[in-house]
Image (spheres, rainbow, N blue to C red):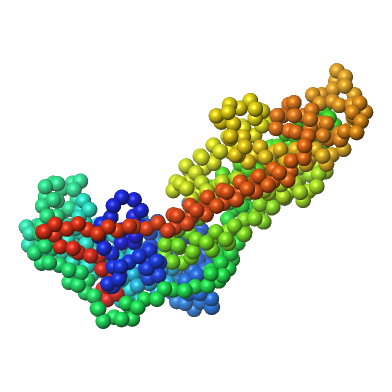
Amino acid sequence: NALSLGITSGKVMGNIELNGKKLTNQGFKDHCFLVEQYDHHWPFLTCKETLVYAASLLLGSGNHSSVVENIIDKMGLQSCKDTKVGNDFVQGLSGGQKRRLSIAIALLKKPSVIMLDEPTSGLDSAASVAIVGELRKLAKSENLIVIMTIHQPSTKVYNDFDQVMLMSKGRQAFMGKAASAHKYFESIGYPMMQMTNPADFLVDLVNADFTSEDSVISILDEWKLHTSKSKMSKDENLAVDSNDDEFHQLMKRKKSFFHELFVLFRRHAVLIVRDPFVYVGRIVALLIFCTIFALAYWSSREKVQAQAINFYYANAWTISLGSMFAVVAVFALNAEFKSVMREVKNGMIQPATYIMAKSILVLPVMLLFGVAALSLGVYAILGVKANYAVYMVMFAIGIFVFECIAEVLSVTFFNPLLGMLCFLSIWFSAFLFAGIFLPADDIPVVIRWIYYVLPLSHTLDAFSYHVFSGETWPSCIPDESAGAICIDFSQVPGEEPSTLILQELSKLVPLVSGEDNRMEAMGVLLGMALGYKLLYIAIVFIKCSQCTTLEEPVLNETETSVDHDVSRHSNTP
């Protein structure tokens, strides 16, 4: 994490240089690639599609099919190139294949340094040997520096390393050629027995959980004394060719903003169609559940005053249910953001292009949600006569606000379950304080603001006038058999029947009024959506720009500064 500038909390002291140049966040994006311990790919793209989109993002416009095929052959992915990557819910590539896919993407970038965080975790011994062996070949053939963290590798894996750094308690216990490690420890009184895995021997020596703490500290102090005596410098540690002018004049990779936007637009359009959970699944769920609720309120089709309250609730449930399903987006967008952060970290994309592409694509999906929720249940079954297009737009705006809230929560928490819990808390608060059950004036002043700042009250206020004003309501003669609402319109000449019914309904549902507040409510909802969207953008940019802040090390008289300087000529793991 320190070498990849991934530590964003606490204090980190030291220097990190790339061939004599201080490594910055932008420098890392331009010339390094981090393969994280957990592979975050796009689960509904195939292996080949993942590489094709990566090549377009990293190499710019043009036909990169030959490059992609070459990488597929080199990484042994030919047999699974048309297999979807998959995730916890959809079967796809194996763990080893995902890891090779991550390395293949790194090779497309042609970086100077590839860093891998525990690349063999979760893999069997044979797969671990194969991956590390392939990395060694690539380091030689592609002139790469490969740096990895690893826990207790097998003998075969250990023998593929050129240099090893052994650490314990945050301190170095050894740094040097892998083949010389056992000789150093033998010189300080810790000989290695024959037929022993060198990695096991080294880890056992400095494992503070199962080895005497005094012994571990003694080993750490010995190495500190050894480096002090030998005055190890970065030049002795990783030989740097100071004459490599071409490497010292590294140029920032320049890519077209609009090309990147177009590639991301195409990729996420494919993902929206293929992902059965985030959007397509919600469309189907809205169609089914809104139809069920409409059937439950079948009697409100009659459009008589006695059914006015049922007619209201049938539409209210449709609005409320549609917004609640956005909880699914919190989980899915959280996983998506982890993949986005990986791509931003490695210089593949910019946060701005991702946000623009995704925002453009999501807008028509909101209208599709409206079509699914309203067409069959509200218009076909309930027989609503209000303007369809206006109702659909109102529904889409209302649900879009909750979609923006879901976006904010998906990037705020690392654990998506926390974001989903917060979303449901917000939704239930919005439903409780929407004015359906309790008048705003009866809510304690301390929490009355919830009524105004959450979107559901504004959405329900707008739709109530829209659906009631579009209906023809017959007059009612009050008698013992009349329902809760019964108005003889002949007794109130000159008044709009729907307005009179809404005024009477407001005695039962505090939110309802006889006034046309549709434009005002939609304006408030759009303002809310904009506010949440801006908050989402701010969080995305902040999280994508975070990197390690290095402080200059404070040395005493017995210490010697050892910078981490990575040289292009130290090109093996």
185 lies above or below 485: below
- Name the residue at the front extreme: 445
7 lies above or below 416: below
Q: Can residue 568 be seen in the rendering of this structure?
A: yes
Residue visible at 47% across and 42% down in the picture: 418
Quarter of the image containing the C terminus? bottom left
Q: Can residue 87 be seen in the rendering of this structure?
A: no
Which quadrant of the structure image shows residue 267? bottom right
Where does residue 290 sit, x and y in percent of width and height?
A: 70, 41
202 lies above or below 400: below
Q: Left or right: where does residue 11 sit relative to residue 90?
A: left
Where does residue 323 sit, x and y in percent of width and height?
A: 63, 43
Q: Camera-side residue: 128 or 343?
A: 343
392 lies above or below 196: above
Q: Camera-side residue: 383 or 289?
A: 383
Q: Left or right: where does residue 39 sit relative to residue 212?
A: right
Where does residue 552 sit, x and y in percent of width and height?
A: 24, 59
Residue visible at 56% across and 31% down in the picture: 447
Residue visible at 46% across and 67% down in the picture: 348
Where does residue 1 sit, x and y in percent of width and height?
A: 32, 57
Q: Left or right: where does residue 573 sit relative to residue 272?
A: left
Residue visible at 58% across and 68% down in the picture: 262
Q: How many marks?
A: 0
